[in-house]
Amino acid sequence: MATIRANGFAAAALTALAFSTVVSCGGGGSPAGPNSNCSANDSCPYTNVAPPPGGVAQFTVMPLVPGPGQSITALGNLNPPGHVLPTDHAYFYAGDLSKNTPFGTGTRNVYMPTTGAVMFLLQPTGTDWKTMFIVTNNFYFYFDHLLLNAPLTVGQIIPAGTLIGTTIPGGALDLGAFDLAVAHTGFANPARYGKSTLHVVSPWKYFTPALQQEIYAHVYRAPSAADKDGQIDFGVAGKLVGDWFQQGLPADQNSSGPNGWPRSIAFVYDYYDPSAVRISIGGTIGPPGVWAIEPTAVRPENVTPANGVVSYRLMYIDGVAQYGQMLVQMTDAQTIKVEMWVGQTVNNTAFDANAFTYVR
């Protein structure tokens, strides 16, 4: 059973969060606080843990110093089944993603990037921790897969620069940040997402300019990309692009938990090359995976109900070979019909009885 320490959280919400985090890398949801029913645009408190006096929403210390050949990521990684939708956190890797060697050896020290008060602690498996901190009334951040070097307590204020633990040997460290003063327009149905996702920010934007230069030099991102921060909210009303959920899936059981992962699909863009379309499948319609489309295929941002049935050859990411085929049709602005077949030569032209309905 996961060890949970928090202040002001409902027990039921904590149980659900523990379950989802045990089986995922941080998850996409948020723990529910005493004001968790506030709307996405409210500036109400997220927790009853007070921020540190004089807290500043800026990172002045590098939490983990990247070495040669160690990659940092933008937001938006896709990795079904746990991360069917673009991730709302970034990663410090111990290896080089450009060489497909993301892991390394040994542990790396982790420091507090700014002064913050501990507001949430979760230890899913008895080893590493997910630790969340409040910095101001609006700004929060968290680490995941952190090995603490000393116990922390909820409400404890940790000064910037404090050594708080290490990474798992050879493993990656997650860093997520969210700012309640920041809102996004690409979540077609905000009820599907937790606050940490609705108000996600690139943590790299909150570092001092000098530290940003060091970070961005390690970010695994195509030179053609407009930025090195990434994006996770791609939904556009009336268009195929964005996140979809199997009809009948309750809004509180979306991608943040194992019940929702296999019932989610995303028509989004690659976190390395944001010009490249990615179809991320959690399961149900076919095996979990992330697939490219042919260069000549209609892009999801251009698909509307007027397009009728659209056929996608699901290509391996290198674009050389076909994995399978997908048919998708927007039956109205909020609903799609979708079916998938696995095979290198499949070329179906119509749905059969195995098609599924997904909604926003």
Image (cartoon, grey):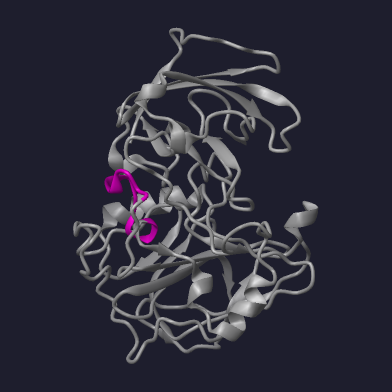
Q: How many marks are shown on the rendered structure?
A: 0
Q: Is residue 140 above or below residue 229?
A: below
Q: Residue at x 43, y 47 (%)?
A: 234
Q: Residue at x 67, y 17 (%)?
A: 343
Q: Nearer the viewer, residue 54 or 310?
A: 310
Q: Nearer the viewer, residue 58 or 132?
A: 58
Q: Is residue 77 magenta?
A: no
Q: Is residue 188 magenta?
A: yes
Position of residue 119 measured from the top left corner of the image (x, y, whole percent):
36, 73
Q: Left or right of 183: which side holds 314?
A: right
Q: Quadrant of residue 293?
A: top right
Can you see residue 28?
A: yes
Position of residue 255 measured from the top left corner of the image (x, y, whole percent):
42, 43
Q: Is residue 7 above or below residue 10?
A: below
Q: Which residues are magenta?
A: 186-197
Q: Residue at x 33, y 35 (%)?
A: 238
Q: Residue at x 64, y 30 (%)?
A: 294
Q: Left or right of 178: which side holds 50?
A: left
Q: Quadrant of residue 147?
A: bottom right
Q: Is residue 10 above or below residue 109?
A: above
Q: Left or right of 291: which side holds 35?
A: left
Q: Left or right of 278: which side holds 319?
A: right
Can you see residue 101?
A: no
Instruction: Specify the farthest residue to the bottom.
Output: 54
Q: Is residue 231 above or below residue 296?
A: below
Position of residue 228 measured from the top left corner of the image (x, y, whole percent):
59, 64
Position of residue 88 measured from the top left corner of the image (x, y, whole percent):
47, 57
Q: Nearer the viewer, residue 257 or 286?
A: 286
* Quadrant where the C terminus is found in the figure: top left
